[in-house]
Image (tube, rainbow, N blue to C red):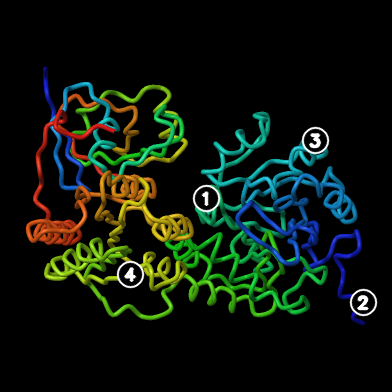
Amino acid sequence: MKQGEYAAAQSAAVPLSGGVHWIGALDPTLRTFDIILKTANGTSYNSYLVRGSDGVAIIDTVKESFSEEFFTRLESVADYSEIRYIVLNHLEPDHTGALPELMRRAPQARLYISQRAQAMLKALLKHDQYDYTPVTTGDSVSLGDKTLRFLNTPYLHWPDTQCTFLEEESMLFSGDVFGCHFCDARLFNDRVGDFRFSFEYYYAHIMRPFREYVMKALALIEPLPLSAIAPSHGPILRERPEQYIAHYRRLATPALYSEIGLEKSLLIFYISSYGNTARMAEAIYQSASEIDGVRASLYDLEGGEVAPFVDLIEEADGILFGTPTINGDAVKPVWDLLSSLAVVHTRGKLAGAFGSYGWSGEAVRMVEERLRGLKMDVPVEGLRIKLIPTDEELNACRAYGAAIGRALTGEAENRIVEMAQLQTG
Amino acid sequence: MAKAKVTFLDLGLTVSVPVGTRVIEVSEKVGAGLIYGCREGDCGTCLMKVEEGWNNLSEPSVVEAKVLKENLAGKHCRLACQAQVLGDISVRPA
């Protein structure tokens, strides 16, 4: 009876188990989510209702414009007066849009949010009258015969994110983790269409910058016995949920084992119109390679595409950019790569810039500013050389490469300077 | 003018500064990893860990104390845009 599989096409709640219902909303026409994400078949805003012997808990709500659908589903399985707890795994408006109206209808309900969510609650909802309890890993709340236990999983993908585990049913309400933008009224992973691409795409754009936090969250989630993962977007993963956890670990682990081992990886990207910046790059590459503990790699941006370079940067300890100055700016291939790094973690990496120029040479400083903006350390002042490097200037390139190498291995001598000697601006 | 030394451990760089200087004024000039957002003690972006000389910084204002609390800042963490240098300190990005 295939027709019966499209349960969410009806306006009633959809059971996940005896005590748990899906009361979310479908948004099949959405094509762009949060500016940065595409979706070829919309999304869903998943909300769940958990019924215990001592009342009802609601886990997350929906985007405000989908409130009516949400309330209709909620009313099909519970009275507002029964709601004791509202758990917010993530405060982004697509999950809290219906919250103010829900609180108006169920004023007795108490909010359970993460510690980090407290400051956001007020800023997002412009309301300071809500009663809430901040929770973290180890805290739980009882619905009589059902227990909701909280897992603190920050930065997946906001500081406030958390997961909630329904102990008696081994069900994980994961928030955005394990979610994807894929709208299908059949709801469950063993019934919906092929959503593998959407699952990986969502990880790559939403979770990837927070890879270290993904690993920490997986360490909390992997030991749990799981009957299902119920995320806040996309299919509910009830068939082999452990496969999705294993896949997250694979996605958060480099695909090819790095041969660089304990050495520090320094990537030198350059682009050159007359070969001058290329000569600088080669001299820097040569001297940095000579420093013990540094493994340098040299790449001409003209011969590569952005995405694989982003992958390399994610793993690197240090990154240098060589760019000529053309019409007072760094060149487009350099900016293309530098504007594509939001999906990887760059904070704390060592970085620097160098380049040849004709008469003004602004590019190096501009690139350095961008590197600092990406929260990287720029410990050695960038090197600019007018047109063709002389032997003496190539020696300066070698000294620059060696200084970068030493900074990378932590062997840089502590320098002492006067504030008045520092450059301004 | 009284001077104090600010050491940026992530750079291996010590800067001698006039007492009363805010840490952010120095860190932005040397390119330390202490990045900032609002510079007004509101966003918490410039959070830093004070490894040495904890007592050589101005006391946190009410505004700073609130932001530190909201960001669940660890012990000896301060905002670089608020803390003024009173004596020698060593810092790194938190």
Type of amino acid under label 2: Gln
Type of amino acid under label 1: Thr
Which numbered mark, 1 or 3, is in the foreground of this view?
Answer: 3
Give the x, y percent position of residue A424: 24, 32
Type of amino acid under label 4: Asp
Task: Check disc 2 and report its element: helix, strand or loop.
Answer: helix
Q: CA distance from mark 1 to mark 2?
A: 42 Å
Give the x, y percent position of residue A65: 80, 46
Residue A411 horizontal side relative to residue A372, left or right? left
Q: Which residue is mark 1?
A: A136
Which numbered mark, 4 or 3, is in the foreground of this view?
Answer: 4
**Which of the marked residues, 3 or 2, is nearer the chain's N terminus?**
2
Q: CA distance from mark 1 to mark 3?
A: 26 Å
Instruction: Assess whether mark 3 and mark 1 are in contact (beta carbons under 8 angstroms).
Output: no
Q: CA distance from mark 2 to mark 4?
A: 56 Å
Instruction: Assess whether mark 3 and mark 4 are in contact (beta carbons under 8 angstroms).
Output: no
Residue A133 makes an appearance in the image: yes
**Which of the marked residues, 1 or 3, is nearer the chain's N terminus?**
3
Quarter of the image for residue A352 reads: bottom left
Task: Check disc 3 and report its element: helix, strand or loop.
Answer: helix
Of the pair A402 and B10, the residue shown nearer to us: A402
**Which of the marked residues, 4 or 1, is nearer the chain's N terminus?**
1
**Which of the marked residues, 2 or 4, is nearer the chain's N terminus?**
2
Q: Which labelled disc corresponds to residue A300?
A: 4
Q: Which residue is mark 3?
A: A104
